[in-house]
Amino acid sequence: MPRPHSYVVWIGALVALCLLAAGAYLWLRPAHPDALWKIVSEQCLPNLQRTGQPAPCALANPAAGYVVLKDQNGPLQYLLLPGAKITGIESPALLEAKTPNFFLQAWQARGVMARRYGHPIDDSMISLAINSEWGRTQNQLHIHLSCLRPDVRQQLQAADGRITPRWQPLTLDGQPWLARRVTQEELAQRSAFRLLAEGVPGAKEAMGHYGLAMVRAKSGDFLLLAIERDLLTLNLASAEEIQDHQCQLLRNQHAQASR
């Protein structure tokens, strides 16, 4: 039978891990967490109204409620952001039917990557991701449009046939994820955020604990991927980690074509 002392040690270690994770989160938080919102509200939208050009944004559609901005990290990474103030995945507004379908809009805007690259980009190389409340650095919702990591793409292609329209466990990059298949028609009817909140027990009450990603399946459907924060393993649910902002997949493709 374990001694009381062992329980004290275990609890102490647990508390230390939680404090370490919280400390890391606070340490990594930027000095200006509203920088993205200021770009949207003070530059992109006003410039569109004054000049007809949404600079520094690449795209702006006020009627549809979004803008697309080139991220500083990576040659082809872009961000889709709401034109209104929405802090992140934890916002209750994302579960309202009237809220724009940001994941679908982000997928429809993926052409900005190909235009910048100068060549078509296969859909299987593209991914969308939003980080959890703990795994992000900005307090304006932003969906990362970027290349998929080669190893993650390979893992997803291997698992593709086993992923059903119901949320199910999936080990990806050594981490416990949830995955489900969704058609484009289903995604148009219910946003990725609602599919997560309504399909995973307990998610609706803790949306900020989740990171969410989406890729194109071989069948033409989409694969939704969700990861939940786990402080014990220092997992902050940064879904962006499945992305490769340097786009090695495109480099490999170019190298093969040059042979």
Image (tube, rainbow, N blue to C red):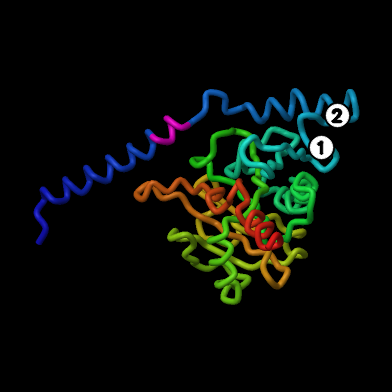
Q: Secondary structure at mark 1?
A: strand
Name of the residue lying farthest toward the bottom: 161
Q: Is residue 239 left or right of residue 7?
A: right
Is the residue under label 1 in contact with that under label 2 (CB below 8 Å)?
Answer: yes
Few, some or many residues within 10 Å of mark 1 (<14, 14–19, 20+) = many
The CA distance from mark 2 to mark 1 is 8 Å
- Residue in the picture at 39% in, 36% down: 22
The stretch of residues the image draws in magenta is: 24-28
Q: Based on the displayed image, in which of its 4 quarters is residue 82 positioned?
A: top right
Residue 218 at x, y = what percent?
68, 71
Q: Secondary structure at mark 2?
A: helix
Q: Is residue 204 above or below residue 178?
A: above
Q: Give the quarter of the figure containing the C terminus.
A: bottom right
- Mark 2 highlights which residue? 48
- Mark 1 highlights which residue? 60
**Can residue 205 be seen in this snapshot?**
no
Q: Amino acid under label 2?
A: Leu
Q: Amino acid under label 1?
A: Ala
Residue toward you, 79 or 73: 73
- Residue in the picture at 48% in, 53% down: 228
Q: Is residue 194 left or right of residue 134?
A: right
Q: Give the quarter of the figure containing the N terminus.
A: bottom left
Residue toward you, 197 or 68: 68
